[in-house]
Amino acid sequence: MTVTVEVNKKFRKELNAGTAALVLLSFLAQVKEPMYGYQIAKIIEARGENIRMMKQGALYPVLRSLAAAGLLSSYVDPSISGPPRRYYQITDSGNHTLTEWINIWEEIKAFIDNIVGGEENV
């Protein structure tokens, strides 16, 4: 039983690592204004309801990576009542990349659905 739990945990972690950037780009393409990390995490968490997609701490490295790649822009807003917040917004390059990633995702999803749910004779 423990082996299954560990294997499932590893599988979920690998799957999440591969989809986190797509989820974040998609989300930021849908919002109208820049958002800060904690705000993004809470909204994604609420939208996912009881689906354990990604931990909040895992979002920040992905956001930084997307920004470093030029897919997101960011700026720091100092706060009087707490630590400064870094706000993120999708760039034109991010929107273009998102379109490509969605196409890739659809191809991968179709392949997986075909194999996992396929009833074709082998």
Image (spheres, rainbow, N blue to C red):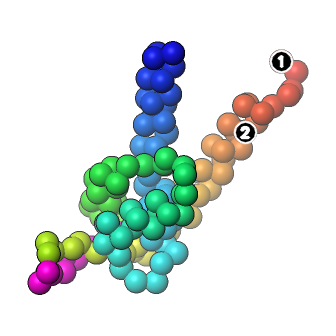
From the viewer's perspective, is 47 left or right of 13?
right
Q: Which residue is mark 1?
A: 122
From the viewer's perspective, is 15 left or right of 105?
left
From the viewer's perspective, is 101 left or right of 58?
right
* Residue at the image point whose x is 43% and y is 75% from the top: 92
* Residue at the image point whose x is 36% and y is 70% from the top: 39
| Segment colored magenta | 72-81
Q: Which residue is mark 2?
A: 113
The x and y percentages for residue 62 are 33, 54
* Residue at the image point whose x is 48% and y is 36% from the top: 12
Give the label on residue 48, or none.
Answer: none
- Judge whether 105 appears above or below 90 on screen: above
The question of residue 79 being in magenta is answered with: yes
Magenta stretch prevailing secondary structure: strand
The x and y percentages for residue 75 are 22, 76
Please report whichever mark, 1 or 2, sits nearer to the chain's N-terminal start. 2
The x and y percentages for residue 85 are 21, 73
